[in-house]
Amino acid sequence: MSRWIIYLQWFFLIYMLGISLSYMLLNIISIFSIIGHMATRRLDVFLDSFSDFEPPVSILVPAYNEAATIESSVLSLLQLAYSEFEVIIINDGSRDETLQLLIDRFQLVPIPVAYQIRLPVKPVRGFYKSNLYPNLRVIDKENGGKADALNAGINATRYPLFCSVDADSILQRDSLKRVMQPFLEDPRTVAAGGTIRIVNGSEVRDGFLLQAGLPGNLLVRMQIIEYLRAFLFGRLGWSPLNAMLIISGAFGVFRKEMVVQAGGYNTNTVGEDMELVVRLHRTLREQGKKYRISFVPDPICWTEAPADLKSLKRQRTRWQVGLAESLSQNLSLLFNHRGGLVGWIAFPYMLIFELFGPVVEVAGYIFVVLGFAFGIVSIQVLAVFFLLAIGLGMLVSVTALLLEQISFHIYSSPRHMISLFFAALAENLGYRQLIALWRLQGLLKWIRGGPPRWGEMTRQATWQKTD
């Protein structure tokens, strides 16, 4: 056997072992974090004790062609259990009935507004306020993308904190109160995010989540497992280290002045949510400032997941492009002498295992399978590779499901748990490999270059019920 084949075998095995050990380490940190979170905090008492001290918050909702879901989303926001907040919908040049639906449903009337343009944005066509809800405003502007819409919302905010929420998302009534916990506990907090759950298969009526359920679509059920793993292990593992590089654009709270000083959302990326968080880390580290960027597992935001392969592929390739843009545009954070754990551990991890991971994973499968077929890879190497790639993947997915059950048990019925258990096994047998291939395509798309494009996802909104 030639030497380079032996080297390749060891490279792929060591890489898969490294990523597996990283997952397990994050899992251990997450388990201790969630146990401490559930055992030491009486959250309801804590929240009540701070009910008179909640800082006011501006909720920003960028909307582009969201007529199918915008009504339920706005209603869920208006019914939040929070002392003082405003809701600002930014209609980013929608071509459907989004704006007219908002005008009719919430009795919007045009108003003159003078405000400071602290962040450059596409021209604003008009401002509206609701005659039904005094804390609801709408900005109508030319299309400039999600980041541009959020910047326009930041320009119009009244309060020192803002919360970004996707237009197809549903917040539980206590979600905003709960995600504010880090700001109340530590004044150095500049950003905090909550948990994203998949709403497909659930029932929402007039903005209220009536019942959490599971969709019949196996593709969506496997995404539920993905989200459990990403938030209960990924975010929860990095947060205690103050090294979390992602706050989902679907639900995150930021200190406005810090974001404005950092330049606002980047309009030259499709991953504006992650890029902003990485840039905040970089700029605050370079300035030598003490800060916290936190994850809170309690607050839940429900959002619709792609239910077809075409939409899912667009989403995942876009996420990989956004990851590449976020890391490349903030590369000075890597091994920065002031970088701390985020610059010396989290950033290299994202670079090696998340950005370039699809290259190694896809190449590893091809090399090991073809190598075994042609007799240049032994059965032992084949078995170890698949044990690391698939067996440990199943273990992590099932552990995430068990952690969900002992902590928040959103899916409490035995039927739901059995269904999710089989989805946790099935997602490692073809689904994850397909996702890796799409991520590789996203990486190649970024390397080729070109203007950032978001694309569109077809909203089914079968979970939405209105009276």
Image (cartoon, rainbow, N blue to C red):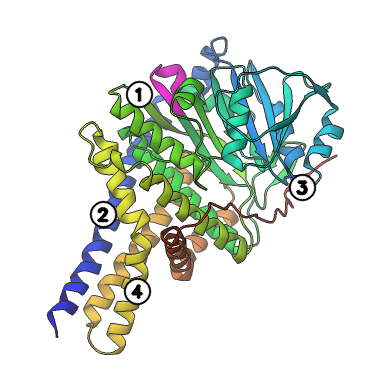
The disc labelled 4 sits on which kind of residue?
Tyr
What separation in Å lies between label 3 and label 2 (alpha carbons)?
48 Å
The residue carrying pointer 3 sits among few (fewer than 14), some (14 to 19) or many (20 or more) residues within 10 Å by Cα, namely few
Along the line of sight, which residue is nearer the eye, 258 or 393? 258
How crowded is the residue under tag 1: few (<14 C-alpha within 10 Å), some, or many (20+)? some
- Is residue 42 in sight in this rendering? no
Magenta stretch holds residue 354: no
Q: Tell me which amino acid carries mark 2.
A: Leu
Looking at the rendered structure, the kind of residue marked 3 is Arg
Is 362 displayed left or right of 48 in the figure? left
**Of discs 4 and 2, which sits in the foreground?**
4
Above or below, 348 relative to 445: above
Q: Which mark is residue 365?
A: 4
Label 3, label 4: how many angstroms apart (C-alpha)? 43 Å
Residue placed at 32% from the left, 66% from the top? 360
The earlier-in-sequence mark between 3 and 2 is 2
Q: Earlier in the sequence, mark 4 or mark 1?
A: 1
SS for callout 4: helix
Q: Position of residue 102 (x, y in %)?
A: 80, 35
Give the secondary structure at mark 3. loop
| Residue position marked by numbered label 2 in the rendering | 21
Disc 4 + disc 2, Cβ < 8 Å: no
Q: Mark 1 = which residue?
A: 291
Instruction: Say which mark, if any, is on residue 95.
Output: 3
Q: Nearer the viewer, mark 3 or mark 1?
A: 3
Q: Residues within 10 Å of mark 4 (few under 14, many from 20)?
A: some
Q: Is residue 247 left or right of residue 206?
A: left
- Chain part drawn in magenta: 182-191
